[in-house]
Image (cartoon, rainbow, N blue to C red):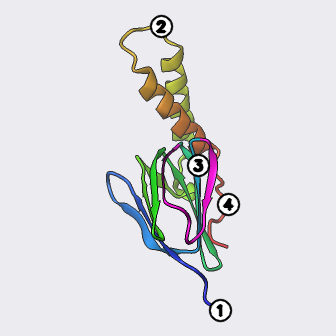
Amino acid sequence: MSERRQRIQVVTPERVVYDADASFVVVPGAEGDLGILPNHAPLITMLKSGPMRIRRGDRELRYVIAGGIIKVKDNRIIILTGAAEEPSGIDQERARAARERAERRLTAQRPDIDFERARAALMCAVARLRADTSPHRR
């Protein structure tokens, strides 16, 4: 029996990170993790920064995404995100420094600070630091 598939595209402003069929995807939805199997009901929702998994056959690909939007319709999933990277490519020291910068901005009492941008940077840095750096293919 063949495995049911759906087309998944993960797109950042710089590039298409993933564009292939897969049997399952898990994304960090705004209200919690969201798992999507083939024939899922149509859906558009916001994503938060965090880990994303894509199952293709017996392999599982892992990425950390920086929030975004997901659209699901007719076995086609489009994920638009500010950034997507494999955990093995994350520089933990840079992520720690980014977290510290964002925390300093959020605690500053200055009117020139963009708090929403600082909050988004903090969420992305935390997601990068929590990324599973173990091998991402089973």
Is residue 3 in the magenta section?
no
Q: Picture coordinates of residue 8 (x, y %)?
A: 46, 68
Residue at the spot of label 2: 109
- Camera-side residue: 97 or 53? 53
Give me the C-alpha separation between circle 3 and circle 4. 19 Å
Please name the residue shown 42% across and 50% down the image.
81
Say few, some or many: other residues with alpha carbon within 10 Å of mark 2 (under 14 / 14 to 19 / 20 or more): few
Please name the residue shown 54% across and 14% down the image.
107
Disc nearest the viewer among 3 and 1: 1
- Camera-side residue: 88 or 127? 127
Give me the C-alpha separation between circle 4 and circle 2. 39 Å
- The mark nearer the N terminus, 1 or 4, is 1
Residue at the spot of label 1: 1
Q: Which mark is residue 134?
A: 4
Q: Picture coordinates of residue 129 (x, y %)?
A: 61, 42
Residue at the spot of label 3: 28
- The mark nearer the N terminus, 3 or 1, is 1
Residue 103, above or below 83: above
- Relative placement, left or right, of 116 versus 90 is left
Q: Which residues are magenta?
A: 31-47
Say which quarter of the image contains residue 16. bottom left
Give me the C-alpha separation between circle 3 and circle 1. 30 Å
The secondary element bearing badge 4 is classed as: loop
Of the residues shown, which amino acid type is indicated by label 4?
Ser
The secondary element bearing badge 2 is classed as: loop
How many marks can you see? 4
Say few, some or many: other residues with alpha carbon within 10 Å of mark 1 (under 14 / 14 to 19 / 20 or more): few
Is the residue under label 4 in contact with that under label 3 (CB below 8 Å)? Answer: no
- The mark nearer the N terminus, 2 or 3, is 3
Q: Determine the residue located farthest toward the left in the rendered image.
A: 14
- Relative placement, left or right, of 80 versus 119 is left
